[in-house]
Image: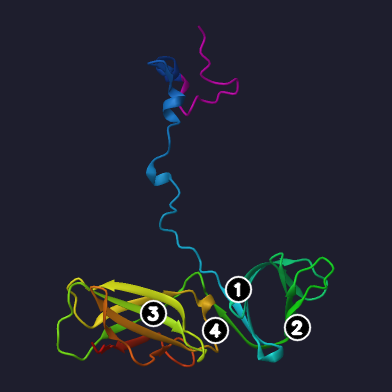
Amino acid sequence: MRTTGTSSMGFSLCGVKPTIIAAAIVIGGSSLCAQQTAAPSASAQPQTKNEMRAAMVWKRFEYVCEGNAKVTVYLRDQTAKVRYGEKQYLMKQTMSADGNRYSDGKVVWWGKGNGGFLQEDKPNGNGEMLVKDCKLVEQSSTQPSAGGVVTGTVTYLQRMALPASAEIVVQLVDVSAADMPATVIAEQKIAAGGKQVPIPFELKFDPVKIGAKHTYSVSAKITVDGQLRFISDKPYPVVTRGNGMKTEVVVRPVAK
């Protein structure tokens, strides 16, 4: 039986010198090459676990439209997020010879210079106009993938221990509309478990949900065994209109 340890050009088999191939070519029915081509060590594997992904930066454009309607457009690469009223549309850029056109198949945003409009996306281009005569009033950048955080503490002035069964609920809310219920942007529920005031909180939110001209506040309440015991009775403004990202919320006892 002949073994071919080297090619006609003299290359060694699997890096083993030809002089030792004859003695080591077959070991227990497995070829030496099979043993030498084992999986690389862990140190040679790609290190992906701790890799950091760059935050996705979105450009934000604020528009004021006919009837003082507000439209916010976020752009990144060929994607657009469009907020109008209580709705948000995720759109992709489409072919257009006139302006920047983004559509989700049902609604289209046309951005032309410092203006734009939002309408139903119809094949003939005559879809119902949702809002028009939009004029750009503000442009900035934000990072929705990185997220935003409002931090602070919840406390009360009464000299009493917080029961271990108490639960603290903290919310970041949009209080822009005085005649409508506040919109909850973020919420955190904290089990007291023996901790005492001040109780720290951390409200993580998506900046895409934040409007530069909206007003945001932090509210808090404390319940014990399902019964409301303390609640905040005034706004604690944060995030926009020159307010910071940290606040101390003082809750008041609820009359029994």
Give the residue type at disc 3.
Answer: Gln
| Quarter occupied by residue 158 | bottom left
Secondary structure at badge 4 equals loop
> Is 154 rendered above or below residue 89?
below
User: Is 7 a magenta residue?
Assistant: yes
Crowd class of label 3 (few under 14; some 14 to 19; many from 20; radius 10 Å): many
Give the residue type at disc 2.
Answer: Gly
Mark 2 lies on residue = 113
Give the CA separation, mark 3 to mark 2: 38 Å
| Proximity of marks 3 and 4: CB atoms separated by less than 8 Å | no
> Is 57 rendered above or below residue 240?
above
Mark 1 or 4 closer to N-term? Answer: 1
Q: Position of residue 33 (x, y in %)?
A: 46, 25
Which residue occupies the extreme left position in the image?
160
| Quarter occupied by residue 34 | top left
Q: Residue at x 20, y 71 (%)?
A: 193
Residue segment shown in magenta:
1-18
The mark lying in front, picked from 2 and 1, is 1
Q: Nearer the viewer, residue 69 or 63?
A: 69
Give the CA separation, mark 2 to mark 4: 22 Å
Mark 3 or 2 closer to N-term? Answer: 2
Give the CA separation, mark 2 to mark 1: 22 Å
Q: Which mark is residue 171?
A: 3
Q: Is residue 215 left or right of residue 93?
A: left
Q: Which mark is residue 88?
A: 1
Q: Is residue 256 left or right of residue 140?
A: left
Mark 4 lies on residue = 211
Mark 3 or 4 closer to N-term? Answer: 3
Which residue occupies the extreme right position in the image?
124
Q: Position of residue 12 (x, y in %)?
A: 51, 25
Give the CA separation, mark 1 to mark 3: 22 Å
Mark 1 or 3 closer to N-term? Answer: 1
